[in-house]
Amino acid sequence: MNTWLFIWNPKLYAWDGWLDSCTELKSDLEQCGLAYLKWTCGVNKSIHTGDRIFLIRLGEEPRGIVASGHAASDVFEGIHWDLSKRKAGQKARRVYIKLDKIIDYKSGQILTYAELEKLSAQYCWSPRCSGVSIPKNVADALEQKWVEY
């Protein structure tokens, strides 16, 4: 199983309904143990069902890990998340994620960017796109730290 970092930068993708989405996803997890999210994975074609995924919020503070789960699908071509690109007919590579944890960054304690840098100062925690591989040693340290949250 591989581990991947997916990004969410509100400056690029506002996700205006974050609070509603977060509340609904958390409720789904609590009530039935299931919550699914569809996310873009950049140019990556190597993500497979079962792979581990972490979602990091970048851009303005607070920055850090806000969700985790496992790929519930292999990579597929879907509608683009960017409205102008969608209107132009462009596609985006996407993955369904079966979430196992989601934290509302507005009210919950996320795994902060500063804490991530302490886990591995060599790893780039702010990639330009989603679907970036996390090396096994970094993924193991991240997983252990994430359990605390």
Image (cartoon, rainbow, N blue to C red):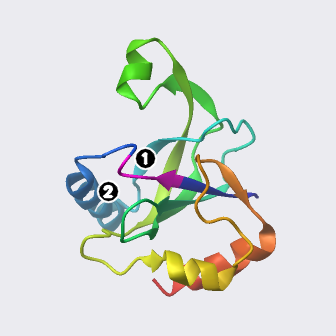
Q: Main secondary structure of the magenta part?
A: loop
Q: Residue at x 41, y 30 (%)?
A: 82
Q: Is residue 119 above or below residue 58?
A: below
The mark nearer the N terminus, 2 or 1, is 2
Secondary element at image label 1: strand
At 41% from the left and 76% from the top, the residue drawn is: 110
Span of residues in magenta: 7-11
Between the C-alphas of marks 2 and 1, the distance is 8 Å
Within 10 angstroms of label 1, few (less than 14), some, or many (20 or more) residues?
A: some
Tell me, yes or no, if residue 144 can be seen here: no
Please name the residue that numbered disc 1 is placed on: 37
Residue annotated with mark 2: 25
Front-most of residues 140 and 128 = 128
Q: Assign a secondary structure to mark 2.
A: helix
Q: Is residue 35 magenta?
A: no
Task: Work out whether residue 75 can be spotted.
Answer: yes
Q: Are marks 2 and 1 in contact (CB under 8 Å)?
A: yes
Q: Quadrant of the N terminus?
A: bottom right
Q: Residue at x 27, y 53 (%)?
A: 18
